[in-house]
Image (cartoon, grey):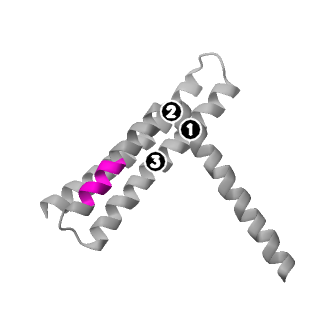
Amino acid sequence: MWGHISSETRRFANTCRWSWQGWTAAWETEKSLRQWTLVNVASVALAMSLDLTAAERAIIVALGVLILAAELFNTALEEVVDVAMPNPNPGAKKAKDCGSAGVALTAIAAGIAWGVILVF
């Protein structure tokens, strides 16, 4: 049993390290990730300063984190497409545009949540 726990602990530590490496690699090269992070810091600060319920705050924070996740997925997609198809290609463009649209839709969802929370 202790061997299994030790193995799982090591695996979890590796997963955390690889995730951090992914975050820092994207942070260094992706201006949009840095911009969305700043927007999220401001969004969380505003959510904490307004008279919102815990559920409303949780929705705002969770949607902000989802925007960052979508941006990371988009970055990964763009990197793979660039390696697989270094020359201009309509399919590559479509894949990248769809990834970008996914980030935009996630951001729109967060904006709608803010709107609903503030209006109602």
Q: Residue visible at 65% across and 33% down?
A: 80
Q: Main secondary structure of the magenta part?
A: helix
Q: Tell me if residue 34 comes above or below residue 62 in the rendering.
A: above
Q: Is residue 84 magenta?
A: no
Q: Residues within 10 Å of mark 1 (few under 14, many from 20)?
A: some
Could you tell me which secondary element the residue under label 3 belongs to? helix
What residue did someone put label 1 on?
26
Of 45 and 22, nearer the camera is 45
Cα–Cα gap, marks 2 and 1: 5 Å
Could you tell me which secondary element the residue under label 1 belongs to? helix
Q: Tell me if residue 64 comes above or below residue 94 in the rendering.
A: below
Cα–Cα gap, marks 2 and 3: 11 Å
Where residue 97 appears, as percent x and y from the top left, is 47, 31
Q: Quadrant of the C terminus?
A: bottom left
What residue did someone put label 2 on?
30
Q: Quadrant of the N terminus?
A: bottom right
Cα–Cα gap, marks 1 and 3: 11 Å
Q: Residue visible at 39% across and 37% down?
A: 35
Q: Nearer the viewer, mark 1 or mark 3?
A: 1
* Left or right: 28 as drawn, with respect to 56: right
Is residue 95 at least partly visible in the picture? no
What residue did someone put label 3 on?
68
Q: Which residues are magenta?
A: 40-47
* Left or right: 2 as drawn, with respect to 68: right
* Of pointers 2 and 3, the one earlier in the residue sequence: 2
Residue 21, quarter of the rendered image: top right
